Image: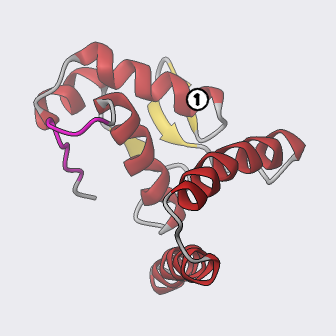
Amino acid sequence: MIIKMDFEADHPIYRQLVDAIKEGIATRQLEPNEALPSVRSFAADLGINMHTVNKAYQILKNDGFLLIHRQKGVVINPQLPGADQAFLDKCQNDLKTLVTEAVCREMDEAAFMKMCQSLFHDLKEKRGNKR
């Protein structure tokens, strides 16, 4: 999986890395039990600080996407978290922020819904093609 960092973006580097790894898992570019590079190696490959990679890994571990073993290193969790109530609450909160901005910018509801559906279907399609 190729990960590209946008060093000029407003989005922090660690967040870009978290999002890229989650997308890799969603599209099955990263499979359950697959090993990820060590913090040092990944940082060198991406040209970023080791602490940035470590922060991203810790967030993904806390969210249930990664397992960190002293001997095996960092691997994709074979038992990924489900859509529990905590996730649904987070999802609703994140969507509320996006919907609020869309309303402020007078975006058409149908266009917003079409965009959401398109993104969802694109990821599901990529996921299906990896099996």
The answer to whether residue 72 of the structure is visible from this angle is: no
Does the magenta portion include 82? no
Residue hosting label 1: 61
Expressed as whole percent of the image width and height from the top left, the position of residue 41 reads: 19, 28
Residue nearest the observer in this picture, 103 or 46: 103
Query: Is 73 placed above or below 125 here?
Result: above
Q: What residue sits 52% from the left and 77% below the top?
A: 115
Does the magenta portion include 9? yes
- Circle 1: residue type: Lys
Bounds of the magenta segment: 3-10
Secondary element type, mark 1: helix
Q: Main secondary structure of the magenta part?
A: loop
Q: What residue sits 69% from the left and 49% below the top?
A: 96
Residue nearest the observer in this picture, 34 or 42: 42
Colour mapping: secondary structure
Q: Quadrant of the N terminus?
A: bottom left
Q: How many marks?
A: 1
